[in-house]
Amino acid sequence: MEFKIEACHSGTEARVGVLHTPHGEVRTPAFVAVATRGTVKALSADDVRALGIQILIGNTYHLTLRPGAEVVGALGGLHGFSGWDGPWMTDSGGFQVFSLGAGKEHGVGKIASIFPGEAPPKPTGPSLVKLTEEGARFRSVVDGAWVFFSPEEVIRAQRLLGADVILPLDECTSPFHDRAYTEAAMERTHRWAERALKAFRDTQGLGPNPDQALFGIVQGGAYEDLRRRSAREIAGMNFPGFAIGGSLGRSKEDMFRVIEWTVEELPKEKPRHLLGIGTVEDIVEAVKRGIDTFDCAAPTRMARNGTLLSAREEGFRLNIKGARFRRDDRPIEEGCDCPTCRRYSRAFLHHLLRSGELSYFRLATLHNLRFMVRLMAAIRARIASGGEISVEHVMEELLA
Amino acid sequence: MEFKIEACHSGTEARVGVLHTPHGEVRTPAFVAVATRGTVKALSADDVRALGIQILIGNTYHLTLRPGAEVVGALGGLHGFSGWDGPWMTDSGGFQVFSLGAGKEHGVGKIASIFPGEAPPKPTGPSLVKLTEEGARFRSVVDGAWVFFSPEEVIRAQRLLGADVILPLDECTSPFHDRAYTEAAMERTHRWAERALKAFRDTQGLGPNPDQALFGIVQGGAYEDLRRRSAREIAGMNFPGFAIGGSLGRSKEDMFRVIEWTVEELPKEKPRHLLGIGTVEDIVEAVKRGIDTFDCAAPTRMARNGTLLSAREEGFRLNIKGARFRRDDRPIEEGCDCPTCRRYSRAFLHHLLRSGELSYFRLATLHNLRFMVRLMAAIRARIASGGEISVEHVMEELLA
């Protein structure tokens, strides 16, 4: 795994680079499309290729439950099994520790969008996770059985899945966890990182991909001293790259500060991934603060819900369900080169979604992911040209 | 609309031909893929094109309810609206007269598969249709409102939808309707056919496609004298082509006899469409009896349910849900040239279906429709070569 920085932006921490993986190059900053169970929802691997998507991220938790890491490993790993033979990442299941655990108890995501003084949200359900020093016990979403994930098990599973970039099991804390809990969880995450590194060395040769890279995950919540300590300790373990996990605080400003603290403590020459973040504004602001790659389910999930991305719309989105699109014969976004905009009108997409036609989901997903590809290309162009980087400037570049 | 018969098979009624439509040629015998609401479920128009599908059939009932024939007409008709600018047919809503009416009351489809003496099935619900001489009143599946379809309205709607081949409103009777009811319904269908022809002349110039062809529909149930009379009377109205509607009796043998009686009374030089039939055996047997085109939702619906077509399997199908496919790294059908078989294993499709991934539906549909395209090509080759026509011979040709 080699990461080559090709140009640094003057005035910000942004840089353009190339991540060389055993299955191809990734030009950064890059958007990593989410393929939780081995496929981008509603798309095929050929679709992904045609869109210009460079890298996918699967999920160790989901793939371990079904079809099982052994099955995927026996069929050539994710590269052989899924039809996508380009670069793969896998997330460790650490986010599920949160989303099925404290996230449910606290009724919250990675960022708690509440106003200061506002009451915290209600639980969305009981925790399905039990955490100990040894690892995480999960209630399976497939059959309700309890399954155990240790840092070692998660590495073994990812060896079989065979992604090019893999991640250690961590504990993603909640924005509503207090400092003491966040610190203790962080320290455990560091101990798990050491165990993961050892397991990674011990399993060399297992699975279909001998050249995997294990990145370290930085935790520490939205507490400056914890984030800086976590970044320094994880950086000290000599991982070839890093990921920044949640909690990212209670606002966008919190999130941007967390990124700044973390990036300041990480070595400049290694790649930095921001886990689970992906709105236009978040990406532009995070790139300026030195982030190289992003994964986020939002563009594909929004597509399925009717929210289509466009540089020409207020908030960069339109909801195709709206009655005003019933007779609108324009493409989603004028000038967009995606397969959907090249052939279909808003009126047809509106009709497909209103009728519950399966065809809708693919056409909408194709558009939103192509938007993300265009967005990242515009960001890279903007960095390389040395111009000012802002959402407005990037959108101008995208439409040029 | 010109239909050119290129070769007749000696020993059977089978023929190969070309149907010239305003939007392209259809080589017959051909399978017409079902696109009820303007799209083949789970596919895009580009997919349909890449598969070699020649012609689609939309549904006037469904498209009138949503998005409305006016909306489709204003956006260029089905050819402009849907992205599929090749040949289109539209069904009249006559099948919905049955499927939402007597079909529910009788708990039955076009062919009642019961053994002689067996009790008839139970109703599946109350009728949502009221029939009068004037037309059919339907309970809308979209919003529950009553909507009225007259033979004239159905022609007007199809003028706006703009398909190349359109059909008059008819009454598709049930296999459990008695002779008297079937005869009265048939006579009304004939009166509706006359009204449709007049409405078709009166609306010349309406809608996006000035060169539409209105085919006649033959009814008469499984009663020989009624079928022959219906075929003669409909043939006497000088339609440029014909469709055979249900009921088709209580067994495959009934259906094949109905086709024989009907074809004997129809002019040789005009095209013959069999509505809503599409298993491998039914198609081969119907082609031998002189049928040129077929539409059927089964191949696409079966795909979505996990039933994948293959010339190499017992009954020409396998159910990909089966646990035995969990680690099966072979394609659905060895040698199949569809986009799914070229890249994906049975194990991956099994995983996608078990996981409820949307990607599954498209990949499965692509395979099943490509199978239908290959099947029809094999049938045409078999007719042209003058060899014996049977399911076995056609499958041999398909695999050659």
Image (cartoon, coloured by chain):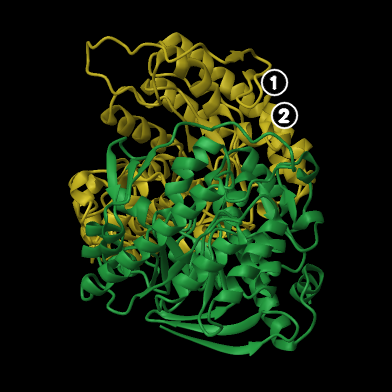
Chain colours: A yellow, B green
Q: Mark 2 points at which residue?
A: A153
- Specify the quadrant of the image occupied by residue A221: top left
In this rendering, is residue B18 above or below B357? below
- Most foreground residue, B238 or A192: B238
Give the left or right position of residue B231, taking residue B255 as reference: left
Q: Do the residues labelled 1 and 2 touch (CB within 8 Å)?
A: yes
**Residue drawn at (39%, 54%), measured in percent from left and top?**
B93
- Specify the quadrant of the image occupied by residue A258: top left
**Residue drawn at (48%, 15%), measured in percent from left and top?**
A102
Q: Mark 1 points at which residue?
A: A148
Give the left or right position of residue A290, taking residue A241 as reference: left
Chain of the residue that carries numbered disc 2 in the rendered image: A
- Most foreground residue, A241 or A143: A143
* Image quadrant containing the C terminus of chain B: bottom right
Instruction: Locate residue B70, reporting x and y percent.
Output: 22, 58
**Residue drawn at (54%, 76%), measured in percent from left and top?**
B266
**Residue drawn at (53%, 81%), measured in percent from left and top?**
B267
In this rendering, is residue B217 above or below A13? below
Instruction: Same chain for labels 1 and 2? Say yes or no.
Output: yes
Mark 2 crowd level (few <14, some 14–19, many ≥20, 10 Å Cα) = some
- Kindly state the secondary structure of the residue where label 1 is placed: strand
Instruction: Locate residue A131, reporting x and y percent.
Output: 60, 14
- Kindly state the secondary structure of the residue where label 2 is placed: helix
Give the left or right position of residue A41, taking residue B371 as reference: left
- Most foreground residue, A373 or B345: B345
